[in-house]
Structures are given as structure tokens and as C-alpha cells.
Image (cartoon, rainbow, N blue to C red):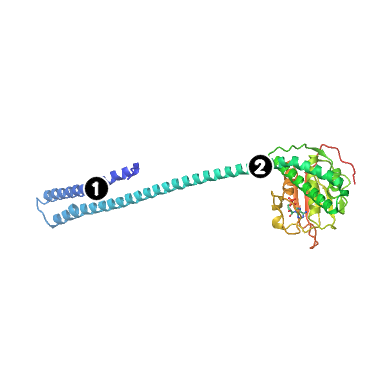
């Protein structure tokens, strides 16, 4: 058993009590008997009567016996206390060992998790690098294919109708693939921090008009709600326009062809919010956060328009990198058959830039 200063002290006390249990009654008994002898011998001229015998029995024998018994009882108590202390010490040691065991196991588990995490990060980086490399390598052949198809289509009048249709379908698919490759490359550049942002004062209205013209053309009814004066925002013109175009393309893609698309601009004290509202099927609550994640798409079925689930992820990242916020509200209107969605991009006002004129 491990000896601590307190157990050592207890041992000393225990052996003292051991000696005392025998020595003290003997000394007390002897003293009492001598005292009685002296007292009765001197008083009664060595005449030992009943009082002498009873006093010797009481003071010389029973008294010391009681003292001996009390000391013996104290010794037992002390022995029990020592055993209890030893048991507590043993339990403590067991507990400490268990804690050490568990802590070591936890540390090992943490190290394993750290390793697994690092491996996953490495794999993710490798995957991104691979995707970026493949996309990069696809760019040059795609440009050649697009150029060839364009030339072929220019002289397609002489071709049979079936061949012309095939050429047109090839042109569409090739354009889609080119757009996909461009988005993948932009996303990997953004994730690697290699996409440059030239922030400065940007006029909102011309960008909205240009985006509508490029993304929707004349095929959609657009309802406008723009204030008379919109202050310039602080953004990167190219990336800001990219986000607006993306929202317009989605509104077009995910709402019935005849339904109008609404564009609203709200000027607040420190920001300008551009809202693109469509009258499509809307986005269920449980999907509203997910669709901003990489490669996440909404419900898919036969009639679902094609896509890769990268547009909103990229749009959100681009907006945030410019100090803006991209939000979604769906349903956007009270009509049950066309609840619609409203995507808003809010950018800070370029406070030191001159006020923008009336463009409406
Ligand atoms: P993609 O359109 O290529 O699938 P996005 O990232 O642009 O990728 O969109 C992710 C998903 O969000 C889409 O698959 C679609 O389900 C949903 N979504 C985006 N815009 C709208 C919209 N205006 N109305 C309804 N659903 C939309």
C-alpha cells in the first residue's frame, strides 16, 4: 500500500494506542492499588476491611479495565478508519487510471479524425484541381468545335433539313458545354482565391437593362419597378452583371413562358436591392438553403430544365466577395398556382460617388 504522510501518522497513533491499551490500565491499576494500600494501611494500621477490598476492585481493577476497553474500542475505530482510507485511495487510483486510459483513447481518436479530415481536404483539392484541369483542356477544342459549327451553319441553307437541324442541335449542346466549362473554371478560380475583383462605383440601371436584353431578349414580358434615381453601388461591374444575368436566366428557365418576370429596385439608406421576381412553381422551404450549395438542384423530373446546380452557388459567392448579400423569398406572390420566387441582390451604396441620373 502506498504510504502518504497521513497514513504514516495514523500508523504511529495506532501503535501508541496499542501500547496505551495495556500500559495505561496497568499503571492506573498499580497506582490505585498502591494508593489504597498506603491510605488504608496508614489510617487503619494495616487493617484491610471491606471498603479497602471494594475500593481496590473499583479503582484498581474495574477502572483500569474500562480505560483499557475504551482504548481498545478507539483502536478498532482507528483500524476501520484506516481501512476506509485505504479503500478510498485504491478507488482514486483506479479512477485516475481510467481517466488516463480514456484521455489517451480520446487523443488517439482526435488524431485519427484530424488525419481523416486532412485526407478529405487533400482529396477535395485534388478533385477541384482535376476538374479545373479537365475544364481547361476542354476549352481549346470546344472553341474549335464552336467555330466549325458556326461556319457550317452559315452555309446550312444548301443542306437537307434533317442535317441542318442536327447541326443546330450540335451548336446548342456545344454552347451549353462551353458555358459549363466556363462556369467550372470561374468557380475553381473563385475557390482558389484567384478571381480578381475590381471594386468601384457602378451604375445599376444600365447593367439591369443590358442583362435583360442579353438574358431574356424579347421573349419575355418584363414588368419594371425602378425608382427615379438610383445611387451608384460599390461593386465589380462584370461580376455584378454576371449575378443579375444568372438570376434572370433562372427566372426564365423555371417559370412558364407566358408568365411575366418582374424587376424591382429598392434604394435604402446604405444599400441598393435589385429583386428578380418570377411566377414559376416556387421553391419549397426545405430546399431554400440547399439550392445555394455546390451541385445542388431542386426537384428533378422529365420536365425539369437542364442544369448543373452551380449557378446560384457561384452567384452567392460572387455577391459575398463584393460585400453584398443574395437572398431568396418564395412564395413571392399570393397566387397558389404560381407562387413564384424572388431573388434579391443587395449591394452597398458607393457613398462617395455622384448620384446616378434618371434612367427610367
Ligand atoms: P441549375 O439551374 O443549373 O440547376 P442553379 O444553382 O442556378 O443551378 O439553381 C439551383 C436550383 O435552384 C435549380 O436546380 C432549381 O431547382 C432552383 N431554382 C433556381 N432558381 C429558381 C427559380 N427562379 N424558380 C424555381 N427554382 C429555382
Q: CA distance from mark 2 to mark 1?
A: 85 Å
User: Is residue 66 left or right of 339 when viewed as pictured?
Assistant: left
Badge 1: residue crowd in 10 Å (few <14, some 14–19, many ≥20): some
**Secondary element type, mark 2:** helix
Of labels 2 and 1, earlier in sequence is 1
| Residue at the outermost bottom position | 336
Residue 193 marker: none
- Queried on whether the Cβ of the residue with tag 1 lies below 8 angstroms from ligand 1, the answer reads no
**Residue toward you, 62 or 108:** 108
User: Is residue 147 left or right of 67 when viewed as pictured?
Assistant: right
Badge 2: residue crowd in 10 Å (few <14, some 14–19, many ≥20): few
**Residue toward you, 273 or 196:** 196
**Residue located at (68% from left, 43% from top):** 131
**Residue toward you, 269 or 224:** 224
Q: Quadrant of residue 48?
A: bottom left
Residue marked by disc 2: 130
**Residue toward you, 216 or 51:** 216
Residue 283 in percent (x, y) is at: 74, 57
Residue 184 in percent (x, y) is at: 72, 44
How many labels were placed on the picture?
A: 2
**Is residue 270 shown to the viewer in this render?**
no
**Is residue 42 shown to the viewer in this render?**
yes
**Secondary element type, mark 1:** helix
- Quadrant assignment for the N terminus: top left
**Residue located at (61% from left, 43% from top):** 123
Residue 149 in percent (x, y) is at: 81, 45
Residue 212 in percent (x, y) is at: 85, 48
**Residue located at (13% from left, 57% from top):** 50
Residue marked by disc 1: 18
User: Is residue 111 left or right of 280 when viewed as pictured?
Assistant: left
Amino acid at each position: 500500500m502506498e504510504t502518504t504522510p497521513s497514513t504514516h501518522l495514523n500508523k504511529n497513533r495506532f501503535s501508541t494506542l496499542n501500547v496505551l491499551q495495556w500500559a495505561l490500565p496497568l499503571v492506573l491499576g498499580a497506582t490505585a492499588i498502591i494508593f489504597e494500600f498506603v491510605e488504608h494501611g496508614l489510617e487503619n494500621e494495616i487493617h484491610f476491611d471491606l471498603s479497602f477490598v471494594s475500593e481496590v476492585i473499583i479503582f484498581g481493577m474495574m477502572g483500569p479495565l474500562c480505560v483499557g476497553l475504551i482504548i481498545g474500542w478507539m483502536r478498532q475505530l482507528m483500524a476501520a478508519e484506516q481501512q476506509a482510507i485505504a479503500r478510498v485511495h485504491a478507488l482514486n487510483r483506479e479512477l485516475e487510471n481510467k481517466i488516463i486510459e480514456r484521455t489517451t483513447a480520446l487523443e488517439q481518436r482526435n488524431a485519427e479524425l484530424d488525419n481523416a479530415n486532412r485526407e478529405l481536404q487533400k482529396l477535395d483539392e485534388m478533385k477541384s484541381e482535376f476538374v479545373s484541369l479537365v475544364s481547361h483542356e476542354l476549352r481549346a477544342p470546344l472553341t474549335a468545335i464552336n467555330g466549325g459549327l458556326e461556319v457550317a451553319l452559315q452555309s446550312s441553307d444548301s443542306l437537307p433539313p434533317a442535317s441542318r437541324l442536327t447541326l443546330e442541335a450540335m451548336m446548342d449542346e456545344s454552347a451549353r458545354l462551353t458555358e459549363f466549362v466556363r462556369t467550372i473554371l470561374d468557380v475553381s478560380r473563385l475557390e482558389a482565391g484567384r478571381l480578381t475583383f475590381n471594386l468601384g462605383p457602378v451604375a445599376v440601371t444600365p447593367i439591369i437593362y443590358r442583362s435583360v436584353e442579353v438574358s431574356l431578349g424579347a421573349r419575355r414580358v418584363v414588368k419594371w419597378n425602378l425608382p427615379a434615381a438610383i445611387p451608384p453601388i460599390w461593386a465589380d461591374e462584370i461580376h455584378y452583371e454576371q449575378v443579375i444575368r444568372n438570376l434572370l436566366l433562372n427566372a426564365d428557365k423555371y417559370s412558364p413562358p407566358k408568365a411575366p418576370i418582374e424587376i424591382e429596385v429598392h434604394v435604402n439608406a446604405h444599400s441598393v436591392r435589385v429583386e428578380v421576381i418570377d411566377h414559376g412553381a416556387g421553391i419549397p422551404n426545405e430546399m431554400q438553403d440547399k439550392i445555394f450549395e455546390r451541385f445542388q438542384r431542386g426537384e428533378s423530373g422529365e420536365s425539369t430544365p437542364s442544369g448543373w446546380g452551380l449557378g446560384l452557388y457561384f452567384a452567392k459567392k460572387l455577391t459575398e466577395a463584393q460585400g453584398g448579400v443574395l437572398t431568396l423569398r418564395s412564395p413571392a406572390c399570393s397566387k397558389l398556382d404560381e407562387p413564384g420566387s424572388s431573388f434579391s441582390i443587395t449591394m452597398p451604396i458607393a457613398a462617395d460617388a455622384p448620384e446616378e441620373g434618371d434612367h427610367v
